[in-house]
Image (tube, rainbow, N blue to C red):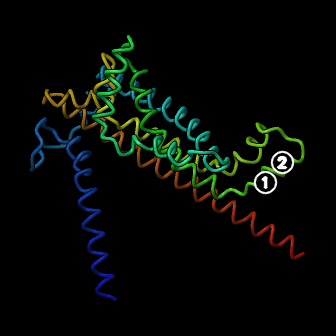
Amino acid sequence: MKNTSRSLLVYAFIYLGFLYIPVLFLPLFSFNNSMYFSFPLSGFTFEWYREMFRNEAMHQSLFNSIRVGGFVALFSTILGIFGAKAITRYRMRGKKPVLAIIMLPLVIPEIIVAVALLIFILQAGGSLSLLSVALGHVLLCVPFSIAVLISRFEGFDQSMEEASADLGENSWWTFWRVTFPVVLPGIVASLLLCFTISFDEFIVAYFLSGTEPTLPVYMWNQLRFPKLLPGVLALGACILLASFIVIAFAEWIRQRNNNMALRQSLASMTSKIR
């Protein structure tokens, strides 16, 4: 038993090292006083960060990714709420086949989705822009949103909605006052997940962005110019730091909600005992 536990621990360390050690080279080389990535390091400098702040094209691509990610996160989560509520609350024929069709983008290679969307948009007379990228990302993110929110709706007692309706509330106010607070952690998780997927997605954005590149497309294009790579590394280090902050904030919210739920349960039990 001890040998098994030790083997699992060693495997976990090896896996985490394989996953995260390459990421640590990103901030390390962003402070290197050389445009070439090699050891030993040439020195310490903030020049690449100053170059990053002077690069207007990089700023624009970052702003494009944030705009697209925000739209995709909001729109995909709204569609995910409707989809998850319909799947968990209503009985309908063909529900499983419909759900399987909705989840298809999870298993279809992104290159196929990107090429199909490109052909469809061009044949329909549309133009390639950030809007086409956003629509493509919504197609990819809605299945993730529905998968996250289904678990929240399934764990929610439907009798609370029925009690609200019996007291005279319409469906909108029932959702807003009763359902929404319960599924809020799932909504926040869906927003964060969809934003992250959209912000990081490359293949669909590469095919559909046109003359307005998102940040992953911009960074890919800079690989041809060695002089610009250190600035890209500096931006990557900043994004990595921001990601850790977002993860820590999300974990804090989760722990806070769990503690509040625990206190409410204890208060309810205490009142019943009294």
Q: Residue furthest top?
A: 125
Task: Give the quadrant of residue 132.
Answer: top left
Regarding mark 1 in the picture, which secondary structure is present there? Answer: helix
Residue beneath the point at 20% across and 44% down: 29
Across and down, in percent, residue 185 comes to 60, 50
Across and down, in percent, residue 61 comes to 34, 24
Q: What amino acid is labelled 2 in the image?
A: Ser
Across and down, in percent, residue 248 comes to 48, 52
Tag shown at residue 160: 1
Write down the residue under mark 2: 164
Task: Give the quadrant of residue 240.
Answer: top left
Q: What amino acid is labelled 1 in the image?
A: Met
Judging depth in this view, the residue of 8 and 236 nearest the camera is: 8
Residue beneath the point at 37% across and 13% down: 127
Q: Is residue 129 above or below residue 50?
A: above
Across and down, in percent, residue 260 comes to 69, 60
Q: Is residue 84 above or below residue 116?
A: below
Q: Is residue 140 left or right of residue 118?
A: right
- Residues marked 2 and 1 touching at CB (< 8 Å): yes
